[in-house]
Amino acid sequence: MRHSCLVTDYRIAEAAELLGVSTDTVRRWVDSGRLTGHSTDGRTTIAGADLARFAASAIDDAERERTGAGAVSARNRMRGLVTKVTKDTVMAQIEMVCGPYRVVSLMSTEAADELGLEPGVLAVASIKSTNVVVERPPDPRSNR
């Protein structure tokens, strides 16, 4: 990944890792024109802005298909499997696995019972926050 003030290009393998797909899938998307790639010195790269647009569009489409969500204000919806439910008389802690992510939710025991949440049940975690921390990982190819 190259960093400058204005330009970030991603190699096929980097784009595949960011999108959670194989390098072959990214190559097919570039070859079909679904994703714009540029060849320089025999190496295909994808402009960061193009990759971001593609990712946002693909995520929106996949999310609508996976969750069946119509108009919902929570944008971060992850379908997953309930793995653990811990209840007391008032509150319940629900643990889920959503792809590579572990999600933990606290809700009333009454709500957990009404939803029928127990290990093995399919559920959708909707995450909405007023504070999201974003950071950039160090570039492993940089000597900085």
Image (cartoon, grey):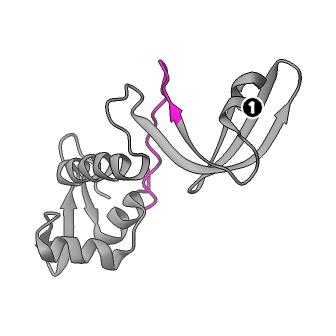
Q: Is residue 122 above or below residue 19?
A: above
Residue drawn at (17%, 63%) of the image = 35
Picture coordinates of residue 75, whole percent (x, y): 39, 33
Q: Is residue 38 left or right of residue 28?
A: left
* Magenta-drawn stretch contains 134: yes
Q: Is residue 11 left or right of residue 137?
A: left
Picture coordinates of residue 105, whole percent (x, y): 67, 32
* Magenta-drawn stretch contains 91: no
Q: Which residue extends farthest right?
A: 88
Asked if residue 126 can be seen in this view, the reply is: yes
Q: Which of the 4 quarters of the picture holds residue 60?
A: top left
Residue drawn at (23%, 77%) of the image = 28
Picture coordinates of residue 26, whole percent (x, y): 28, 71
Element on which disc 1 rests: helix
- Region rendered in magenta: 126-144
Q: How many marks?
A: 1
Q: Is residue 100 above or below residue 116?
A: below
Asked if residue 40 can be seen in this view, the reply is: no
Residue drawn at (52%, 48%) of the image = 79
Quadrant where the N terminus sits is: bottom left
Picture coordinates of residue 104, whole percent (x, y): 68, 37
Most frequent secondary structure within the magenta stretch: loop
Q: Residues within 10 Å of mark 1 (few under 14, many from 20)?
A: few
Residue denoted by label 1? 113
Q: Is residue 4 above or below residue 11?
A: above
